[in-house]
Image: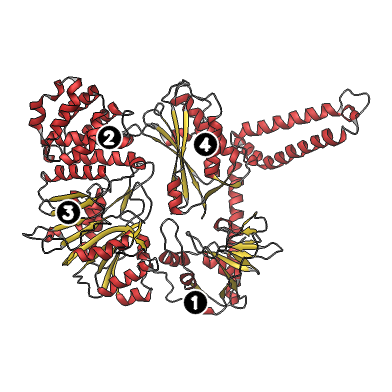
Amino acid sequence: MMNSENMNSSDEVSQSVERIRDLINVVRGDIPVNDFYFILLLFVVYNYEYDDFLNSNIINVDNDNFHQELIKVLRKSEVIEAVSVFENTISNIAPFKLKIILEGVFDINFNSAVFDAVLNIMTNAQGKISGEFMQPKEISRFVISLSGFSKLVNKWPIVYNPFAGLCSYGAFLPKESVYYAQELNKKSWAIGLLRMWLFRGELNNVFLEQDDSVKNLLIGAEYDEGKFDLLVATPPFNLKINSFGNTKRRESVEKFLIENGLNSLKENGKLICVIPVGFLFKGGSDKELRKNLIDRGVLETVIQLPSNLFINTGIPVCVLVLNKSNANNGYVKLVDGSSFYSLNKKNKKNERTLDDKGLTKLINSNIENDFQLLVSKEEIEKNDYNLAVNRYFIEDLGLEDIETSKLETLGNLIKVVKREKVIEKTGKVIKIGDLSKDKIDYTKTFKELENRNLGNSLNLLKQDSLLLSMVQVDLKPTAFVKTEAEIYYPPNFIMACLVDPEKINLDYLVLELHKEYVQNQLKSKRMGTAIQRVSRKDLLEIKIVLPNLLEQVDKVNIYRSSILNKKQEDIKELVKSYGIDVADENSFLRHQIAGSLKNVRGTFSAIKQIINEQIVPKLPEALDLKRNPKLETTLFDYLNILERDITNINKSVNVVGQEIDLTELTVSKFNILDFLTNYVNEVKNRGSNLFTISLDIDEDLLIEKQVKGIFVNGDKEFLRRVFNNIIENAEKHGFNNTINPENKIEIDIQYDFDDLEIQVDFGNTGNPLPENYSHEAFIRKGSKTGANAGNGVGGWFMNEVMKLHNGKFGFTDETGPEGLFGEMITTIELTFPIELKL
């Protein structure tokens, strides 16, 4: 076996990985992508069974007997169980292709670093098919660092790893440790076995079973006093299983692991697990378990990790450290590690990489600061056993010397509206996206909403009310004014309340609820994973600054005056900037007349329609009328001249400015996923395409997050022009206007439910962009490149449209190592702000 010390540099590892990529391409299309792992099997066995490969002279065996002889050599390996998993895969590959791969296996430098680099890329590229992902090494390394094994002397720790996956924890354990693990997925188990063999050099202390951890959790087994020193696990997130024992009750896999895993530990043993943060604040059985752990004194540490650490899910996770000999004496250490990360800029999905070394240093310091503190059992009990870390790291609001009041303590300052039973079957329903973001114009009737079917979970609004959002990042205070329309709202997402005008001015209250000190309080109280929410109880505990009514009115007037002055200053600056030279003056004049021009075009179209459809049928000679009998020009001629000149003026205005005609923008709220689906179907039906096109909206993720619709505010026609522009560019530049079966365009959707954004990626398999082509060059007006260059406004146009939609335009050229196993060479990225329907 090759020693890892022989090849440490990232360059050497990258070179080996690149060469293995070429080997994988040899069998691409011949076998399923989740069978590519067999190549890692060949590498590992060869590096351990070097002599057997050479003595068999396997390369020179004739093709008729090649499969049989190769498998015979592989079966001599110590990991014959892993070999058996891939025998069928090897038998289905043509002998000449296997020989090409074996020549590469014999020639490429290989070690554990190369193994993990290739395995990581394979699992990331194949995860949607195989369902298996590799846990980031930073998380595995961090969890093992919490075990304290580095401080042990003359002792071999005994470790149990249920739900082992690819044995990521085993790779970071001391080689002297005894490692028991279970993994149900057969291929994952086989790769985990190879990985342990490669990392440890032997399997004497490794007991990896292909087994169901739920059905056969190792409790009370005969291993060194019948117990383990450490249990580590990352169980499948949010999995529901049958309750352990004989009952038919369903429970979370996290609860199952914690309750039963503690029983498998020695008296001084630890259980460390990576689980969704929902466990920290959910009610019911999860809350009962939290209370039990705190009362028993076994919960030692709770660590909030950054979001987006896993490629397969954006679910925020935390690390729990349970210690049967916890020495914190009635306290729990809470660690806010949400900011300990770096961004992987090469990855278009913007995954984060955990700064595990910095986080470990923080925890080992045992110093209370802005990121870690000890919280007493009494304080946790006061917070109703809610362990959401953000609740306990409240920023200094600067309100100590200012008179403040909780919303709930002011009597009927804010009084929650009582539930009104829904009787009707249809009605108008308010959604979070319908609430106002404006600090001044915040009043709505909602009578413009369309009728929809009503459910039992809605409330009827019977009077003027203040509506507050309990989800996402803003309260979005909105004053509802009752009209004849019946308006309903979801009380689980929106709180309706009455405001006492004798105690607080509504304008003032809305301004305060938008302020940063209120947002900071909300930040500490919000809970949730994909969708953040604040409970009604916590919302009513928000503190606001409350002067007397006269001062409240004065503050509102001062704010409105400042807004008015700011607008006036902005107008002055705009006029000044447009008055610099003639070109700028023309641009200013263009914007001045653009709105009127649109009205003229619309009015003319209406007049022409009235004449043709209502006047001419009754008075056929109308179009022949003349202003003066001596003149030749008729009404028909005047209409044509007017239409021609209006069209020419409009074109001239657009040409002079060389800008998008903003007067043509028609904004509406629509389901972006439905729009994309219809667009792709339209493209497929064009008949003259040089490519195949597909759309991946990841419906499984939407179901997991309980998202029923994703909406954007925008102009469909402008966006369709952007999409067409992207496809035309792919045809011209990527595919060189030629037909090829390999020409593919894939539209992939990336969701960010934390920041409420959606990224639409248009990837193509054509030629890459020019080397060192910058984003600035792409979006610069007049910038041209390539043999098929157009007028140089395509990239600029797309960027301008995205700015109009409050979005972002970008691209990724995936010709480097990050695109190792992906077909897409160039990807255009469009990012939109979104609203969710839940």
Q: Secondary structure at mark 1?
A: strand
Using the rendered view, name the quadrant where residue 720 is placed. top right
Which image quadrant is residue 225 in?
bottom left
Residue furthest out toward the front? 246
At x 37% / y 76%, what residue is drawn? 382
Question: Can residue 830 be seen in this snapshot?
Answer: yes
Left or right: 232, with 716 as reference point: left
**Can you identify the residue that label 4 sits on?**
798
* Residue sitting at x 24%, y 51%: 211
Which amino acid type corresponds to the residue marked 2 in the rendered image? Phe
Q: Position of residue 489 (x, y in %)?
A: 59, 63
Mark 3, secondary structure of its residue: strand
Q: Earlier in the sequence, mark 1 or mark 4?
A: 1
Q: Which residue is mark 3?
A: 180
Q: Viewer-nearest of labels 2 and 4?
A: 2
For mark 2, give the secondary structure. Answer: loop
Residue 588: percent from the left, percent from the top?
A: 63, 41
Q: Earlier in the sequence, mark 3 or mark 4?
A: 3
Mark 1 and 2 residues: CB-CB less than 8 Å, in contact? Answer: no
Q: Is residue 800 visible?
A: no
Decide if residue 520 is on the left or right side of residue 80. right
Residue 805, horizontal then vertical, whole percent: 54, 45
- Could you say which disc has been placed on residue 405 in the image? 1
Sort mark 4 into few (<14), some (14-19) or many (20+) by Cα contacts within 10 Å. many
* Residue carrying label 2: 36
